[in-house]
Image (cartoon, rainbow, N blue to C red):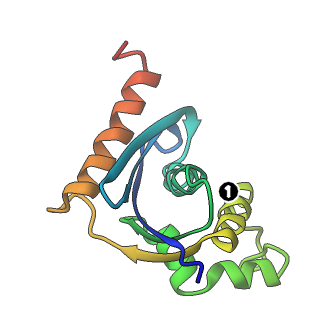
Amino acid sequence: MNRKKNVILYTDGACSGNPGAGGWGAVLLSGEHRLEISGGEAETTNNRMELTAVIEGLNKLKYPCAVDVYSDSAYVVNAFLQNWVTGWERNGWKKNDHKPVLNLDLWQKLLELTRIHAVTFHKVKGHADNALNNRCDELARHAILEINGKFD
């Protein structure tokens, strides 16, 4: 019996200005293993950073896993829990108002990754008492400071 490894992935994205310098952070947990990753872009949006955090976290997995993704981004979580993504794809990546879906490149990449991994999305309250969500926020904000040259 081939059982997928269980992974917990916490993610967060942040922006200084929207658009502006942005950062993302992710914490992956599997058994006793923990990996923290982060990065950023000089000119981006908060939503792109939220999506990038999940994508980069899933990209770190070497083989198909069962992944619980925890994010404070309603944009990311609701797209899957309310099946927006499948509707967008079915409608040629157009929203209900017939306008194109923003961040199409990232949505397509994330959808591709959810077809490799068994992903379950969970919404967490941002800037609350969730230590792992807060750590992802710290990682994302630190990435923004690095982009802006405040840390070397």
Q: Quadrant of residue 69?
A: bottom left
Work out whether 89 lies above or below 126: below
Q: Secondary structure at mark 1?
A: helix
Q: Mark 1 Cα within 10 Å, few/some/many (few <14, many 20+)?
A: some
Work out whether 113 lies above or below 44: below
Q: Quadrant of residue 30?
A: bottom left
Work out whether 78 lies above or below 60: below
Residue with the most extreme front position:
1
Q: Is residue 128 visible?
A: yes
Q: Is residue 96 visible?
A: no
The amino acid pointed to by label 1 is Leu
Q: Which residue is mark 1?
A: 106
Looking at the image, residue 92 sits to the left or right of residue 43; the answer is right
What residue is shown at x 36% (from left), y 65% (from top)? 72
Residue with the most extreme left position:
129
Q: Quadrant of the C terminus?
A: top left
What residue is shown at x 39% (from left), y 76% (from top)? 122
Looking at the image, residue 93 sits to the left or right of residue 147; the answer is right
